[in-house]
Image: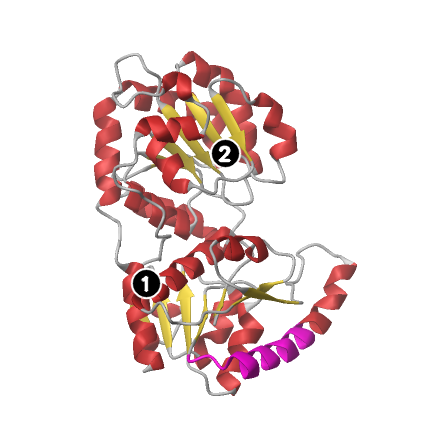
Amino acid sequence: MISGGGTGGHIYPAIAIAQEIMRRNPEAEIMFVGARDRMEMQKVPQAGFPIRGLWIAGFQRRLTLKNLLVPIKLMVSLIQSVFLIKSFRPDVVIGTGGFASGPLLRIATLFGVPTLIQEQNSYPGVTNKMLARGAQKICVAYQNMEQFFPKEKLVHTGNPVRQDLLKPGLELKMALAHFNLTTFASQERPSGRGLVLLILGGSLGARRINRLVAEKLNYLKDQNMSVIWQCGPYYYPEYKDLASERICVVPFIDNMAMAYAAADLIISRSGALSVSELALVGKPVVFIPSPNVAEDHQTKNAKALVDQNAAIMLKEDVLDDRFEEVFTRLIQEEALRQALGRAIKLTAMPNATRDIVDQLSLLSS
C-alpha cells in the first residue's frame, strides 16, 4: 500500500515507486490510499493504479469552522485505515507525505506491518516526523536529516522521479507541436529562432509567478521567445485569454516529457521534487522559491544549487527589479545556458527510485 498526496510533490514520488515495483514484479498488487477530494484521486488512476480515499484533512491556518471537523475526520480515517489494512493485507506500507499517510501508516504499525517513509524535503513535514518512530526505514533526499529522524533508520536515496519524465530521442518538432507552437518547430535551432521558456509554478500554480509572467509577456515576445505556461487550475480562468500563437497557457501539464523536450529555459518553484526532476532534465533553470513554506526550505533547496553554479535564484522581492536583467543575459549568452545545464545535471540522483524499492524489498522479504 502506498499513501501520499495533496500536492504533486507527494503524489509523483509515490507513483514513481509504484511503477518501479511493477517493473520488477508485474504480478505485484498495489493499492494507493489518498485523501478524498484531493488531486491524488485523479492523478493516481490516470497512472493506472487503484486508489481509496480517506475522509481526512489538515488544520487550516486561518480561523474557520472546518477545523472543528478535523478530529472527527481523523477518527473516521483511522477506522477506515483499519478496514483497508485488514482487507488488503499489505506486505509493506509506504508513506510519501500528505494527510492520508498519517492514519494509514499509524494503523499499519499497530498491525505489525513494516512501513517506509519517503521524505522529499530538506525540512520534513509534520506527518512524516510523527510517523518516524514507527517506521522501519526513512528514505531522504538530503544529508544531515538526523536532526529530524533517527539516524539508524535513514537511507540517503534522493527523490524518485516519474519514469515518463524523459524520453530519449523525443524530437523537438513533436514536442513543440504538442503545445501548438508549430510555427517555430524545427529539429535544428537556426539563429533567430526564439527560445522556448517553460514556466512551472507547481501543480497548483503560483500566484506571484503568474502575475510576473502576465506583466512580462510583452518583454518575452520582444525577445522572440515562446512560452509554455503552466499556471495551475485555480488561476487558469484568469490567464487563459493571454494565450496566443507564441504563448501556450495550460492549467496543468500531464506530459512533462514533451514540456522538457520543448524547453530551452525553465522558471520553477524550488520544491524538493521540482529540484530533483530538473536536475535530471539538465536544462538551465531560474528558481523562484516560495516564501510561504516551513523553514523557508525552498530557498535552501535553490541556494544549494546556486552555490554550485548550477542554477539562478530570484527571490520574489527582487523580481520586479531584476527579472529582465537576468533573462536578457540568459537569452544572449548561450555559453551560460549550456554551463548551467551541465552543472545542474551533475547534481542529479537518477537511481533514487531503484534504491528506495531496494529498501522495500528488504522490508517485505
Q: Is residue 123 left or right of residue 305?
A: right
Vertical comparison of 41 with 182: above or below: below
Measured from the top left, where is residue 112 in percent x and y?
46, 87
Dot 2: element: helix
**Which image quadrant is residue 67 in?**
bottom right
Three-letter code for the amino acid on which mark 2 is drawn: Asp
Measured from the top left, where is residue 307 in percent x and y?
27, 43
Front in this rendered view, residue 24 or 184? 24
Residue on which disc 1 sits: 23
Residue found at x 43% / y 52%? 297
The number of numbered badges drawn on the structure is 2
Q: Is residue 143 visible?
A: no
Magenta span covers which residues? 74-91
Sequence-first tag of 1 and 2: 1
Residue found at x 45% / y 63%? 124
Q: Is residue 276 visible?
A: yes
Q: Is residue 333 left or right of residue 223?
A: left
Numbered tag placed on residue 317 in the rendering:
2
Three-letter code for the amino acid on which mark 1 is drawn: Arg
Q: Nearer the viewer, mark 1 or mark 2?
A: 1
For the stretch drawn in magenta, the main secondary structure is: helix
Dot 1: element: helix
